[in-house]
Image (tube, helix red, strand yellow):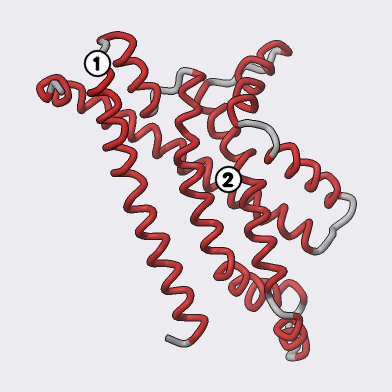
């Protein structure tokens, strides 16, 4: 292991980490918004959009992210729509993540008891107010473990975006291996920086889960 070389390429991995976090942030944010919208549509069977959403979920969950990104990057350019690698990466992550978030949030919405909903309506809340103040907070608390797992999943899936020349962590590791033949050093740094990103997020998610459980049971 060449520690001097590792130190020399450290700034490049820091930059790649920033790109990875940028990709992950936008991919997760958009997938949460998309997932919430799809979950509401499928839970309440809002026609005709429910069938469209179900089709999207099946398509998204049953095709690899790499194929989705290649379609955006190479396929759309054939019909005159040219997107840069970062944009394709964000759209691909959001497209994949939206379906997983939708199922997680849908599970939370369906877990809220009918008694809670009926009580909210009986005190004069409108259906929209009942959803905002009673149903959604409980559903979100229930869905937190699944949403957290999906966030970690999407952060790791950013490695796929290296295939369209986005300089995130995996791209940087492959570049070092290809240019300088420093396989051990590149893989070591790759593991270290993924741990630096993912471990705090994992700890934060567990903390939020415990807080949510405590709030639910009055602890």
Dot 2 lies on which element? Answer: helix
Residue situated in front as seen by the camera: 193 or 44: 193
Q: Residue 145, relative to residue 60: is it above or below?
A: below
The x and y percentages for residue 104 are 63, 58
Q: Residue 158, relative to residue 171: is it above or below?
A: below
Dot 1 lies on which element? Answer: loop
Q: Earlier in the sequence, mark 1 or mark 2?
A: 2
The x and y percentages for residue 22 are 42, 37
Q: Residue furthest left?
A: 4
- What residue does disc 2 label? 30
Residue situated in front as seen by the camera: 11 or 63: 63
The x and y percentages for residue 72 are 64, 23
Res. 14 image quadrant: top left
Q: Residues within 10 Å of mark 2 (few under 14, many from 20)?
A: some
Residue situated in front as seen by the camera: 109 or 5: 5
Q: Residue furthest right?
A: 48
Q: Residue 2, relative to residue 195: is it above or below?
A: above
At a point 27% along the width and 23% down the height, the residue shown is 186
At a point 63% along the width and 49% down the height, the residue shown is 100
Mark 1 to mark 2 CA distance (whole Å): 36 Å
At a point 13% along the width and 21% down the height, the residue shown is 2
At a point 73% along the width and 13% down the height, the residue shown is 79
Q: Residues within 10 Å of mark 1 (few under 14, many from 20)?
A: some
- Specify whether 210 is left or right of 9: right
Nearer mark to the viewer, of 1 and 2: 1
Q: Are marks 1 and 2 in contact (CB under 8 Å)?
A: no
- What residue does disc 1 label? 182
The x and y percentages for residue 169 are 36, 29
- Specify whether 62 is left or right of 146: right
Which corner quadrant holds the N terminus? Answer: top left
Q: Residue furthest bottom?
A: 123
């Amino acid at each position: 292991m060449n520690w001097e070389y590792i130190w020399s390429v450290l700034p490049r991995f820091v930059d790649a980490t920033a790109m990875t976090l940028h990709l992950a942030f936008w991919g997760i944010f958009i997938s949460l918004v998309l997932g919430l919208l799809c979950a509401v549509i499928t839970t309440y069977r809002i026609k005709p959009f429910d069938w469209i959403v179900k089709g999207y979920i099946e398509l998204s969950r049953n095709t690899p992210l790499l194929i989705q990104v290649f379609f955006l990057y190479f396929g759309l350019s054939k019909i005159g729509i040219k997107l840069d690698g970062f944009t394709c990466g964000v759209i691909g992550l959001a497209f994949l993540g939206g379906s997983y978030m939708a199922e997680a949030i849908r599970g939370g919405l369906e877990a809220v008891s009918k008694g809670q909903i009926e009580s909210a309506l009986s005190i004069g809340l409108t259906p929209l107010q009942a959803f905002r103040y009673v149903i959604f907070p409980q559903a979100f608390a229930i869905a937190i473990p699944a949403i957290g797992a999906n966030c970690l999943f999407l952060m790791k899936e950013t490695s796929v975006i290296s295939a369209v020349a986005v300089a995130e962590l995996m791209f940087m590791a492959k570049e070092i291996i290809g240019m300088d033949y420093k396989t051990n050093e590149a893989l070591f740094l790759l593991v270290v920086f993924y741990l630096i990103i993912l471990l705090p997020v994992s700890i934060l998610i567990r903390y939020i889960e415990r807080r949510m459980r405590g709030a639910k049971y009055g602890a």
